Amino acid sequence: MADPSSYRPKPGQIPDSPGVYKFRDEHGRVIYVGKAKSLRQRLANYFQDLAGLHPRTRTMVTTAASVEWTVVSTEVEALQLEYSWIKEFDPRFNVKYRDDKSYPYLAVTLGEEFPRVQVMRGAKKKGVRYFGPYAHAWAIRETVDLLLRVFPVRTCSAGVFKRSAQIGRPCLLGYIGKCSAPCVGRISPEEHRELAEEFCDFMAGRTGAHIRRLERGMQEAAEEMEYERAARLRDDIGALKRAMEKSAVVLADATDADLIAVAEDELEAAVQIFHVRGGRVRGQRGWVTDKVEAVTTAGLVEHALQQLYGEERGDAVPKEVLVPALPEPVEPVTQWLTQRRGAQVSLRIPQRGDKKDLMATVARNAQQALALHKTKRASDLTTRSRALEEIAQALDLDSVPLRIECFDISHLQGEDVVASMVVFEDGLARKSEYRRFQIKGRIGDTQVWHGEGQDDVRSMHEVIGRRFRRYLQEKQKSGEWGEEPAAAEPPGTPAGDGAPDPTTAVEASDASEAVDPADRLTDEEGRPKRFAYPPQLVVVDGGAPQVAAARRAMDELGIDDVAVCGLAKRLEEVWLPGEDDPVVLPRSSEGLYLLQRVRDEAHRFAITYQRNKRGKRLKSSPLDAVPGLGETRRQALLKHFGSLKKLRAATVEEICQVPGVGRKTAETVAAALATAPPSAPAVNTATGEIIEDDGAPPAALPAERGQDR
């Protein structure tokens, strides 16, 4: 625990102007970001007597080891910079709202030649018009099914669309009248785009014009005694009205507004948002957060506004935002929202009428969401706490292991040997910290064994050594070591011992292939480094040999404050270093369940990486290594000759006949194919027959090549 007076800035150093400040811990990681109208006055509040601070603020300042600030011109700039830094650094003491689910949107891909209506989740994409969010995907599909009678816009995937265009026959929706079938030319691209824009207008709330147009058409058809057409239009009107009934009118003046309500207690807060467009509730969403800082309702509202509109532009920011409390001061937030929208935005508290009544409804939803969350979390927190305590007791640890790292080795009969590292903090998976390793059979700069082969023990020794060697390097960079540790790799060692989980972080390769962007960051930036934070417990997938290898790797580096254990699959026994007998946890033990979850997650992550790596290798071709030969010309060569076997037998003159391939390139291709080893024969997976023609790379056959581990 640090003493705030040890890093308190000297009097007069802090400017009396607007700005944003960052507190860092002893590792240099940013743990809190805040903004202030006057940096001098705000920061002075943190360095008063600890007894007078809010308990959460006291925890933050005693965890921090330094503070720094950036001066800006206006409070609006401070608001923007604060939001950017919170998104970038993910500080642990800032309020961060967590979506209670991934909300689905109704999306129209106006950026495509033939716009498509579909359900979308996740980050918003450019060129796509979004409506929602909706509570359930089935609600979107029901609405779309009704609207396709009137607006038969394409809903099929790119593959189905392309296939229908090739065979000249539309899909089922085209036959039953719920798609205008642009794939076969029944409608021009311009007419289809007009349909998509009318669909968007209707979803945006401009419904009256479409209803009136259909009613006029129905009356005209009836007057001309075209009763079948009149009946179809009548059914279309009914479908539109049923779609409109799914979102009841809540504001009679056709207002576009977002209503935000907050329910809170001393520890947590829940936020509910109703999106009202054209007077109708078009979407609803909710967030829950831990109150890790001393924050008022107005502060929670300000954080919610940043979360809602930080990535939005234009009409996504409504004309009116109704809140239970106004941020202090309110003018910078209003200016910021106006800049995001490009037009004036009204931020206010509803005082009377329908809007006040609707705000009460939103507040009731927030109260119910908080009560439900607390009910679920009470059970979850109790279970996780008991699991960590049982692990600490069974392994005789000094304290509960708040950070657990688990390592697993995966290969296919000794080929493509890889390893995974998964991280659980406070009993929950932290996927942004996951890492992947390619086993290269080296320790430091010394090649000690060949990477191929089924030696899980040596692989485990290598990966543990590489992980903690990087930890020592990061520890040295942060100044926690007075001198370079003897076991650490020299400064010139290539970075990138572990690649992060591609679903949660930037894709990167292993040591000799690429340098991860995170390793090029300066220490002053404060972003979490790959291996900067040690675990309290290392779990390896395996028994006594793997545990001994992991312990030996850490002992060689002088790491003696991290516990190690192994979980063997056969009997789910827990092995400790130097022990002849395993620790057997009860089958009903929450600690055993947690260790199993950690081990299974490491296995899943490792085998996924191994399969992807193997798939890339099996799809590789000798043409991939030809310098200056891109994908287009590779495809042209294979298309011209029909297979790699025929291309290998071709002369330089024959290769030159391929469009775009000159003589120099042809000579390079011929030389590369002449020196490359023959490709493995392709196998018919249905019959097991070996296909003589090696035009396509063979499929992986685990039954014949061995099984994944």
Image (cartoon, grey):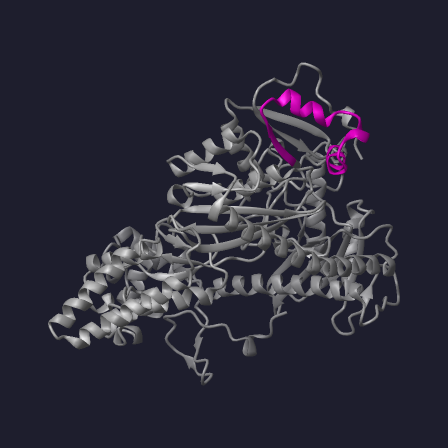
Residue 656 in sight: no
Q: Which residues are magenta?
A: 32-61
**Position in image of residue 344 (x %, y %):** 39, 34
Q: Residue at x 46, y 67 (%)?
A: 138
Between residues 373 and 5, which one lies in front from this camera angle? 373
On the image, which quarter does residue 86 sit in? top right
Please indicate whether residue 256 sits to the left or right of residue 332 in the image.
left
Between residues 671 and 424, which one lies in front from this camera angle? 424
Q: Is residue 36 magenta?
A: yes
Q: Residue at x 26, y 76 (%)?
A: 175
On the image, which quarter does residue 182 sit in? bottom left
Please indicate whether residue 576 sits to the left or right of residue 439 in the image.
right
**Position in image of residue 13 (x %, y %):** 66, 16
In the image, residue 691 sits, relative to residue 157, either above or below, namely below
Position of the N terminus, as image quadrant, is top right
Dominant secondary structure of the residues highlighted in magenta in the image: helix
